[in-house]
Image (spheres, helix red, strand yellow):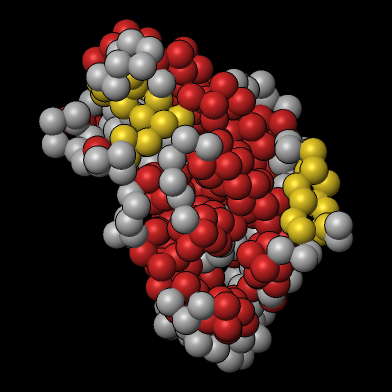
Amino acid sequence: MAERIYRDPVHNIISLEETDPDDQLLIRLIDTPEFQRLRRIKQLGLALFTYQGAEHSRFSHSLGVMHLMRRVLALLGQRYPIDRETRLTAMCAALLHDIGHGPFSHVMEAVLGYRHEEWGARIILDEGTVLHRVLSEHDRELPARIVAVWQHTYRPRFVSQLISSQMDVDRFDYLLRDSLMTGAKYGLYDLEWILHTLEIAPEQEYLYVAAKGLYAVEAYLQARYYMFRQVYFHRNLRTAEAMLRSIFRRAIDLMASDRLQHIVPDSVMAKVLRRASLVTEEYLAFDDHDVMFHIKWWTKEPDPILRDLASGFLHRRLFKSVDMQINAERRRRFLEQARRIVEVAGFDPRYYLVEDRASDIPYLGPYSPETSGPENRIYVEVDGGSRILREITEISPAIRRLRRFHIDRLCFPEAVSEAIRTLVEREEKA
């Protein structure tokens, strides 16, 4: 049997059979230029500034998500009828779920104001992409079905849940993968047991967890909570992101006034800095390498602000930061004082003083059980074989205790660190 084998640090061996028609399609999708581009986009953005092993890409993560989708469907298929079309649509949607990501994953979305989900749909539906042609050659309706999965309009409903919900194959993979590659152990949980306890409520087509899976799901939700607290919202990672935002704000301002010298006219980056709309082909040419090339180039920029910010980012001379617990009434006056400190020290506060709010919605935040749709809740069977389901917060004190959190930080140059910290301490005591 001819196989395409991918060695994976999380799942060990991911294999596709070259003689199977559906696997042949998946292989062709993996080999497209659009999917290969994901090798050039880091899964964790700027986490490598903190965790030197976090060099893994959206490519490896996407293969992992596809692999887990195959496993889930195989297990569910032993107890529930799942037709071939549904299986293939689910596999393709899993493999391609991150196809719309831009440079450094989520970081640049905040900088440039786009959503990777929207770009993913555009890429899939654009007749000029190789991905679209490969999908359409197999089934003309397949691109539209994949987008329907992402938009939660596909039926059966559990397919969309497996792609994007509070408990999906995307999260299953990235928690284990990010935990392994960063060396942080917070993301470990019992994946195998969860996979073996997933069930489908036939009437509603929704997923639920068998009673025996409750504790494994609790551990999974806690793992996600602590990965956000300790890894995804790490202080140095967030200050690196703040610095990158300042770099691009300055580059955009210089571009608007025709003062940016180190830029290739009519390039994709030039259009990005002018806030011009990109066509699909241009967007697909934009990856981590473009951003780093320009940041390296901007270390020679005549403008002293952009040059300084780019040099600091490139050589990891990052902003410092301090957590703030200052109420809204006092915050405005505090920020005005902080701006004066930064300005007196010779820095432009528009670029050298950055407010950052790191917040997560570990489970409860996206909804209240009374108003949120069933697809975004986790239901657990009360007793083994009873088919009596309860939303997990109704039966799990551990998950009820997980509360939304936020961390307010102020990022600034090291030169004003002592003065800013003193100001924060004084305000918090007031």
Q: Nearer the viewer, residue 15 or 320?
A: 15
Q: Residue at the location (65% across, 47% down)?
A: 67
Q: Residue 214 occupies which quadrant of the picture?
A: top left
Give the vertical position of 270 relative to 82 (above or below). Answer: below
Q: Residue 248's x, y, as percent?
A: 52, 64
Q: Nearer the viewer, residue 194 or 80?
A: 80
Q: Residue at the location (83% across, 53% down)?
A: 5
Q: Residue 179's x, y, as percent?
A: 66, 30
Q: Residue 121 occupies which quadrant of the picture?
A: bottom left
Q: Residue at the location (47% across, 72% down)?
A: 142
Residue 166 left/right relative to 271: left
Q: Residue at the location (61% across, 79% down)?
A: 134
Q: Residue 136's x, y, as percent?
A: 53, 81
Is residue 159 at least partly visible in the picture?
Answer: yes
Q: Nearer the viewer, residue 91 or 327?
A: 91
Is residue 169 at least partly visible in the picture?
Answer: no
Residue 69 left/right relative to 25: left
